[in-house]
Image (cartoon, rainbow, N blue to C red):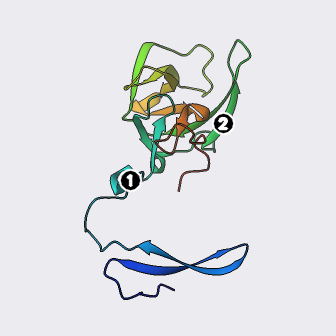
Amino acid sequence: MIVADGRAGTSIVPVYDRYGLRRIPLPRRSPGAGSAPAGSRSRSDWGWLRCRRCRHRIVRGEQGVRRQGQHRHVFFNPRGILFLIRCFGNAPGCLSLGSVTAEFSWFAGYQWCYAHCVGCGQHLGWHYQGPGGDHFFGLIVNRLTTGQGSSDPPAQGEPP
């Protein structure tokens, strides 16, 4: 429950802590008034997964797709390196590079090439191309983040 304290632009919001109920005055913004508070993201940033290295927007979480019945996959490459990837129908922040090949493809019937961050060139995963023009991106989970700060955890969870 928000209780107005009589001053314009502020509210008292009940906050529980380990000592019990406390009332802490917090700024209250009118809808559409002013700019976003420092450190917050604009509404247009919500849902974006970003490159962990440079924070460039890579893909929106709702672009997640299922391949072979799953959105997330765990694979080993020929060198024995383990990758946890998430599949996305499109990744506007990725640049597909290299020759397309079917060699050691993790998805039957699909060819692949490398997917790199448009912002910094970091290898983020693979762009898969299949029959009938079908394509998707398999992006490496620990090379993506949900926020803009340097201490953000890797992106987790399934698409909505």
Which residue is outermost to the left?
33
Left or right: residue 82 versus residue 132 is right
Which residue does the numbered mark 1 point to in the structure image? 38
What residue is at 61 percent from the left and 46 percent from the top? 156
In this orientation, which residue lies closer to the viewer: 134 or 28?
28
Q: Nearer the viewer, mark 1 or mark 2?
A: 1
Query: In the rendering, which numbered label is found on residue 73?
Result: 2
Residue 78 is situated, as x and y percent measured from the top left of the image, at 69, 13
Classify residue 80 by image quadrant: top right
Look at the numbered discs 1 and 2 and tell me whether their residues touch, using CB distance below 8 Å: no
Q: Considering the numbered disc 1 on the image, is that residue within a helix, a strand or a loop? A: loop
Classify residue 76 by image quadrant: top right
Residue 7 is situated, as x and y percent measured from the top left of the image, at 34, 83
Left or right: residue 9 versus residue 157 is left
In this orientation, which residue lies closer to the viewer: 68 or 7?
7
Q: How far is disc 1 from disc 2 in space, using C-alphas? A: 37 Å
Q: Could you tell which of marks 1 and 2 lies nearer the N-terminus? A: 1
Query: In the rendering, which numbered label is found on residue 126?
Result: none
Whether 157 is drawn above or below 33: the answer is above
What residue is at 28 percent from the left and 59 percent from the top? 35
Q: Amino acid at mark 1?
A: Ala
Residue 82 seen in the figure = yes
Whether 86 is drawn above or below 104: the answer is below
What residue is at 53 percent from the left and 40 percent from the top? 145
